[in-house]
């Protein structure tokens, strides 16, 4: 699908000399199947893209030289590469996106939605704020992951069904809004 978003991410050459592969964030399609008792299954296929905010973040404690050494140049902007965001994205992001139908999704403000909790194994969880927007583009369903980052506390937000978002998009209805 033609879109203005990055479809293939170039690797980052880290100052430590190692390449950080970003191909796991390349654009892809995901098909979600909604099953409800007494109703036929409904499938929704989304074309998914990712923002560089999933692996970049500038920190106030970094010097200008440190930020310059870590600078990642995306087509629309530039930001310092962040190993913490990169590591979380590499471990969790694709799996989260592929399982949105079973994740707890909340309203994240500004017409966006988020997934907030990830399983680390052995029953441990971590709060990982994965913000996405859902829309139609050229008659196709689209998800754009606008950011993904760790948070220390569980974010608040009204729960919303991913399948309600998908159904409304496909039906041309307004997307679910948080209560006022």
Image (cartoon, grey):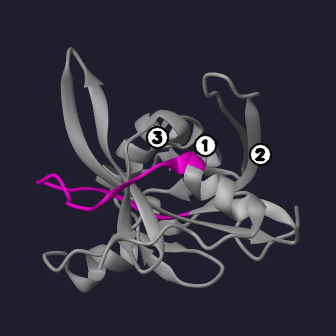
* Circle 3 crowding by C-alpha within 10 Å: few under 14, some 14–19, many from 20: some
Which sits earlier in the primary sequence, circle 1 or circle 3?
1
Q: Can the viewer see residue 142?
A: yes
Position of residue 83 measured from the top left corner of the image (x, y, whole percent): 34, 52
Q: Can the viewer see residue 7?
A: no
Say if 90 sits above or below 86 in the image.
above
Outermost residue toward the top in this view: 122
Position of residue 165 measured from the top left corner of the image (x, y, whole percent): 58, 57
The residue drawn where x is 37% and y is 43% is 104
Label 3 residue SS: helix
Say if 60 sits above or below 92 in the image.
below
CB-based contact (under 8 Å), mark 1 and mark 3: yes
Distance from Cα at disc 2 to Cα at disc 1: 19 Å
Label 1 residue SS: helix
**Which circle, 2 or 1, is nearer the viewer?**
2
* Circle 1 crowding by C-alpha within 10 Å: few under 14, some 14–19, many from 20: some
The residue drawn where x is 73% and y is 57% is 8
Q: Give the range drawn in magenta.
A: 145-163
Which disc number belongs to residue 24? 1
Which sits earlier in the primary sequence, circle 2 or circle 3?
2
Which sits earlier in the primary sequence, circle 2 or circle 1?
1
Which disc number belongs to residue 45? 2
Q: Quadrant of residue 138?
A: bottom right
Which disc number belongs to residue 90? 3
Position of residue 110 measured from the top left corner of the image (x, y, whole percent): 42, 81
């Amino acid at each position: 699908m033609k879109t203005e978003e990055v479809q293939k991410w170039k690797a980052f050459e880290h100052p430590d000399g190692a390449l950080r592969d970003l191909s796991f964030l390349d654009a892809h399609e995901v098909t979600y199947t909604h099953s409800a008792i007494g109703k036929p299954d409904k499938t929704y296929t989304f074309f998914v893209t990712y923002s560089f905010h999933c692996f970049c973040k500038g920190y106030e404690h970094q010097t200008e030289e440190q930020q310059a050494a870590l600078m990642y140049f995306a087509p629309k902007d530039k930001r310092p590469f962040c190993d913490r965001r990169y590591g979380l994205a590499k471990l969790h992001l694709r799996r989260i996106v592929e399982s949105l139908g079973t994740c707890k999704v909340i309203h994240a403000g500004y017409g966006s939605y988020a997934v907030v909790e990830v399983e680390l194994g052995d029953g441990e969880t971590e709060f990982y704020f994965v913000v996405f927007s859902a829309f139609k583009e050229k008659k196709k369903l689209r998800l754009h992951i606008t950011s993904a980052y760790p948070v220390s506390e569980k974010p608040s937000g009204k729960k919303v069904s991913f399948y309600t978002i998908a159904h409304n998009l496909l039906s041309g209805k307004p997307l679910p809004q948080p209560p006022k």
